[in-house]
């Protein structure tokens, strides 16, 4: 009886009386034989109570895997007969729906596995079922449209779905939730989605965090009149880092092979903030900078911009950004002129990042998880299934 109780709990076969357990010849399958206790049932036709048995049949049901072994239940299913009207009907149970050949515990196991980044084929292999069956189970899950929160984060990821190369992800960074996935990042996709919300609901949004993609800013200006637009810090910092790295690569090509190799291997020292380096590494950076005046000037601009990023408040940030503009204007580095124009064009939204504590960090984390899912599944071309999988995985 104790063993039977353990099996009931483990496999979700409530009130089952286990009669036999066999290890299959290939040792990859465990056969569990059980039946339910005889009980009084109500006739579905005339509501008469009866416990008269008409016959039995053996129903094979797939159960959840245990370790490396698959489980096959042999359920001795009892059929009752009503003495009043002659109706024949099967007994009630809680572990397998009518006409199903998979236990409810196996379905729960499949859905739990799909919450991870496992592919459908790997889940199907673990459960000894077809990929089509996994897809059919998952397709029953639906996701309604969530209400817009006070803070919205918008970004794109490379989904390579049937709708295009990039898909758009909308999240709530404050409460760490994925709101929805759009077929693309183009303006018409954004407009169609946000226009479906009422003006009253859109007016409740206070902050929108985006990268430097113009359709995002245009959409925010058109649909969210009460919200401030914030550029994520990572995206404007990398504009400066890209400019600095272009100069680093140009300068190191002027050196001999050995020195060029040294510069390449030491690039992370040049990327790092000078005050965070050890004394030994600071000396190494100073030696490299003394070999190239242009690199030294670019390094100074990079450090000054990072001082701006470290500003404690909006007023301090505004002052330091003006100082950085002055440094760039007197420098003779064309690579930073383009960077200067980009930062200046997005200045208001960049400075807004010092007013609120929100970034795209959570959204980028979700994007990384989506990359893992795509890699495990060797791509997901069906957009609706990709959207459902991401929303279910991050729910």
Image: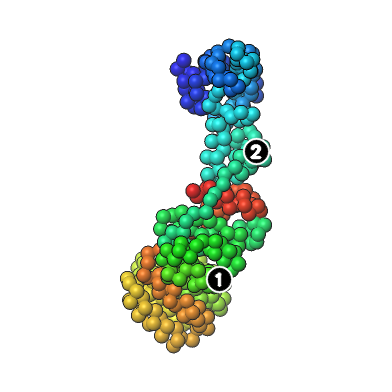
Q: Position of residue 107 (x, y in %)?
A: 57, 35
Q: Quadrant of residue 77?
A: top right
Q: Position of residue 10 (x, y in %)?
A: 49, 27
**Residue that numbered label 2 is attached to:** 133
| Residue at figure coordinates x 54%, y 18% from the top left | 41
Q: Earlier in the sequence, mark 2 or mark 1?
A: 2
Residue 354 shown left or right of residue 6 in the figure: left
Give the tally of numbered discs.
2
Residue 45 shown left or right of residue 172 in the figure: right
CA gap between label 2 and label 1 equals 40 Å
| Residue at figure coordinates x 54%, y 61% from the top left | 196
Q: Position of residue 233 (x, y in %)?
A: 44, 68
Q: Quadrant of residue 271?
A: bottom left
**Residue that numbered label 1 is attached to:** 215
Q: Quadrant of residue 57?
A: top right
Disc 2 + disc 1, Cβ < 8 Å: no
Label 2, residues with CA under 10 Å away: few <14, some 14-19, many ≥20: few
């Amino acid at each position: 009886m104790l063993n039977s109780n353990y099996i009931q709990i483990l496999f979700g076969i409530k009130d089952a009386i286990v009669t036999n357990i066999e290890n299959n010849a290939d040792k990859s399958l465990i056969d569990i034989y059980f039946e339910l206790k005889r009980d009084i049932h109500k006739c579905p036709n005339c509501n008469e109570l009866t416990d008269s048995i008409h016959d039995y049949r053996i129903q094979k049901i797939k159960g959840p895997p245990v370790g490396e072994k698959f489980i096959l239940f042999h359920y001795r299913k009892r059929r009752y007969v009503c003495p009043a009207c002659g109706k024949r009907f099967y007994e009630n149970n809680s572990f397998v729906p009518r006409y199903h050949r998979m236990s409810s515990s196996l379905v729960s196991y499949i859905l739990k596995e799909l919450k991870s980044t496992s592919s459908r084929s790997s889940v199907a292999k673990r459960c000894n079922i077809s990929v089509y069956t996994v897809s059919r189970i998952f397709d029953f899950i639906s996701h309604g449209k969530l209400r817009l929160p006070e803070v919205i984060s918008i970004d794109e990821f490379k989904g390579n779905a049937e709708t295009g190369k990039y898909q758009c992800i909308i999240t709530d960074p404050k409460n760490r939730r994925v709101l929805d996935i759009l077929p693309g990042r183009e303006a018409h996709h954004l407009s169609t989605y946000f226009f479906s919300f009422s003006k009253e609901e859109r007016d409740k949004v206070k902050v929108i965090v985006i990268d430097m993609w113009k359709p995002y800013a245009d959409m925010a200006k058109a649909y969210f009149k009460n919200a401030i637009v914030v550029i994520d810090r990572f995206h404007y910092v990398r504009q400066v880092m890209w400019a600095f790295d272009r100069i680093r690569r140009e300068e190191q090509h002027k050196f001999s092979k050995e020195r060029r190799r040294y510069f390449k291997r030491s690039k992370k020292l040049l990327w790092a903030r000078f005050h965070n380096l050890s004394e030994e590494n600071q000396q190494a950076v100073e030696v490299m900078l003394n070999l190239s005046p242009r690199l030294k000037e670019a390094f100074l601009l990079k450090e000054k911009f990072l001082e701006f990023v470290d500003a404690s408040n909006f007023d301090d940030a505004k002052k330091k950004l003006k100082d950085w503009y002055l440094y760039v204007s007197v420098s003779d580095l064309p690579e930073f002129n383009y960077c200067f124009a980009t930062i200046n064009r997005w200045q208001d939204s960049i400075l807004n990042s010092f007013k609120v504590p929100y970034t795209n960090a959570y959204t980028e984390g979700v994007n990384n998880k989506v990359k893992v899912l795509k890699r495990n599944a060797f791509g997901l071309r069906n957009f609706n299934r990709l959207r459902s999988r991401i929303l279910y995985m991050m729910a």
